[in-house]
């Protein structure tokens, strides 16, 4: 079992050190203990990836953050591109999310098959939902993460931006139509009053 101090030494000097420490302290004591036990025989790595080349081709949050836990390693990869824009509550929740994947793996709750993961990732992934529910129960702000990713996607993914703009334009058109109808009704009432005079 590695100690808490050994874990903290692994993140010393890492760009997200402060946020990882905050996420780590907020994990339940039982989860921290399970993770420290998991990393006894494993190489634990934290890395910041400068860019995810394929992120634009198929926009998905998994392209920007990843935790890989196997029988020999636990690796946490974060996108510099994404973390340059994220706010603290969402950033800490994402780190907790990735730590929770390792926790569930250690408890034998998470399927470790990469093929299953890739297949499930593009649909409604029950595992991702369970991880989000778990960290929400632990007190992390999952809503902040979802809001961040929606805005991040609109900003960086041309398809998502086009869809968003189309929805906004449709809503503006609807409101203008309603406004025009209301104005016509009001003008009709006013015209009726003037005719009566």
Image (cartoon, rainbow, N blue to C red):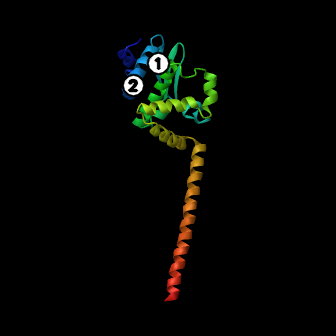
The relative height of residue 168 versus residue 178 in the rendered view (above or below) is above
Question: Where does label 2 land, which residue?
Answer: 28
Residue ID for mark 1: 45
Vertical arrangement, residue 42 with respect to residue 98, above or below: above
Which residue is drawn at the image coordinates 52% and 26% (left, top)?
66
Nearer to us in this view, 125 or 87: 125
Q: How many marks?
A: 2
Q: Residue at 37% of width from left, 19% of height from top?
A: 8
Above or below: residue 163 compared with residue 60:
below
Q: Which of the pair 40/87 is nearer the observer?
A: 40
Describe residue 178's horizontal placement relative to residue 93 as left or right: right
Among the 4 quarters of the image, the one containing residue 25 = top left
- The single residue placed furthest to the bottom in the displayed view is 197
Comes first in the chain, label 1 or label 2: 2
The x and y percentages for residue 87 are: 41, 37
List x then y, in percent, for residue 49. 50, 26
Image position of 120 with respect to 170: above or below: above
The secondary structure type at the circle numbered 2 is loop
Q: Residues within 10 Å of mark 2 (few under 14, many from 20)?
A: few
For the point 35% across and 16% down, the residue is 5
Q: Secondary structure at mark 1?
A: strand
Quadrant (top left, top right, bottom left, bottom right) of the N terminus:
top left
């Amino acid at each position: 079992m590695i100690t808490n101090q050994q874990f903290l030494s692994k993140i010393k000097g890492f760009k997200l050190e402060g946020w990882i420490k905050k996420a780590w302290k907020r994990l339940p004591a039982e989860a921290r203990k399970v993770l420290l036990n998991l990393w006894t025989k494993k190489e634990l790595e934290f890395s910041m990836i400068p860019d995810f080349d394929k992120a634009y081709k198929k926009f998905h949050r998994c392209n920007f953050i990843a935790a890989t836990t196997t029988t020999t390693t636990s690796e946490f990869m974060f996108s510099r591109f994404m973390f340059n824009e994220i706010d603290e509550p969402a950033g800490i929740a994402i780190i907790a999310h990735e730590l929770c994947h390792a926790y569930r793996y250690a408890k034998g709750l998470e399927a470790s098959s990469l093929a299953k993961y890739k297949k499930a990732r593009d649909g409604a992934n029950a595992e991702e939902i369970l991880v989000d529910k778990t960290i929400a129960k632990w007190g992390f702000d999952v809503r902040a993460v979802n809001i961040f990713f929606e805005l991040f996607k609109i900003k960086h993914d041309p398809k998502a931006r086009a869809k968003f703009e189309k929805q906004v334009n449709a809503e503006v058109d609807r409101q203008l139509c309603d406004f025009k109808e209301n104005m016509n009704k009001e003008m009709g009432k006013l015209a009726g009053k003037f005719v009566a005079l």
